[in-house]
Image: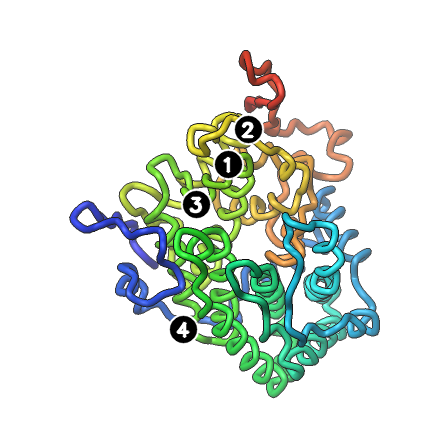
Amino acid sequence: MLNRRTFLLSGMAMPMLNCGAVSGNWWDSEISSFTVRDANAGYFDREKRRSLLHTSKSSTLIKARKRIEKKAPACNQVLAIPIQDQFINLPSFYGDNAAWKVAVAPFRDFEDAVSNLAAANLLTGDVRYADCLVTLILNWAKRDALMEFSYSSKQKQGWYQVESTLFAIGFALAVVRPEVLHREADLSFINTWLVSASRKHFDKRGEPGGTCCNNHFYRRAVYATIVGVIADDDRLFRDGVGAIYSALSHATKEGALPLEMERGPLAAHYQNYALMYLAMIAHLAERQGYDLWSLEIEGRSLHSLVALNNRIIADPNFVSRFSGTSEVSLKYRKDNQYFSWFEMYLARFKNPEMEAWISDRRPLYNRSLGGHMTAYFYTPSGNDVVGSSQSGQSTPRQPRFVRVAPQEGQEGIPTYRLQY
């Protein structure tokens, strides 16, 4: 495990915001010894989770279990999803959202399919779900899917899309891998393709001061980390881990990520959006024995970023101190997938603010970033038991957010405080 360490950079020039997927970063020597120690470690304890899902009387986990059962796909249906082996060039998410939604449908269907197959296998123990998942991915591998995509100053949406599809595959395989070791040749073929696709994509460095090292870098780092793990590829694993060093090097003392703050009205969304990928990388690294949660760079850690994110959730106006605008978009707060990573964090650290924010949103799911996160990480509390209200036993009150009166001039933006 890494010891808690502070890297003092005052004696050297702070890296410009143009590094990321490049060699020669100052942290290369710090992670040069990082290796994949267990390709089967996945991102949670499969057997403990399977047992808990079957035995727990938690109303939340019962809901999570029912969701997995409902979403379990038929193999013939998922095998019919069009394989994306063509040149991938998609409409802009912001420029033409309606056209984008149509174009990404096959990718979304595929990401849902792999995540739901993995969860169905975990819950039921039925190896047919795992075998279907491997066959589905193998079909894409045999067609060299995801290898060709748009990448130019004006057309990057195809490049963006490949990010999430790659890590959706990685996480799904990580869940079922121990159950399909009998398909060694197929897994080897898939790994070769995944590593090739990941390296080709990761070698696109992005634009200095932008996609080189903002949330898209962190998304690329997620697939590099998880593919690095399941394929036992140390180089990819280190490429992914490096994103945390990059993020902490660039963060402000308060924990704000400058390139996400540049999104103006969308800054609150992108702070959280970037953080959910960084958190997953740290979690994957910890599963391999590297404690990046304790890493500090000039006093900044991932917990600094989390603390600021919590402050912004409670008081969205606070982000204006960093974004340069009083306008704050709250649309992202209605989409629960952006908060599914809280489950993973809460399984590791106590955080009343995060617990309060998602307590009534569970079960949480993200089709590409880990799938059924409540099912995989949620730890039931004393009062989360079916029929507990009739048991006569006292249970601790759970924290919750209550809305408070806004300050003058900020009536349109809700502000909350934590109440126990």
What's the CA distance linking mark 1 and mark 2? 8 Å
Q: CA distance from mark 2 to mark 4?
A: 43 Å
Q: Is residue 340 above or below residue 413?
A: below
> Residue 171's x, y, as percent?
59, 64
**Percent coordinates x, y for residue 353 in the rendering:** 53, 32
Residue drawn at the location 65% of the way across and 36% of the way down: 331
Q: Which residue is mark 1?
A: 264
At mark 1, the secondary structure is helix
Q: Given this view, does label 3 or label 4 mark the residue nearer the observer? A: 3
Query: How far apart are the two marked residues, 1 and 3, measured between alpha carbons?
Result: 10 Å
Residue, far left: 11
Q: Amino acid at mark 3?
A: Leu
Asked if residue 34 is positioned above or below residue 254 in the image, the reply reads below
Residue 327 numbered tag: 2
- Are dots 2 and 4 in contact, CB under 8 Å? no
Q: Nearer the viewer, residue 272 or 286?
A: 272
Residue located beneath label 4 in the image:
234
Q: Sequence-wise, which precedes: disc 1 or disc 2?
A: 1
Mark 3 = which residue? 259
Report the residue at 74% width, 64% height from top: 106
Q: Residue at x 32, y 67 (%)?
A: 23
Answer whether residue 51 is visible to the viewer in this image.
no
Please report whichever mark, 3 or 2, sits nearer to the chain's N-terminal start: 3
Q: Earlier in the sequence, mark 2 or mark 4?
A: 4
- CB atoms at circles 3 and 4 under 8 Å apart? no
Badge 2: residue crowd in 10 Å (few <14, some 14–19, many ≥20)? some
Res 166 → quadrant: bottom right
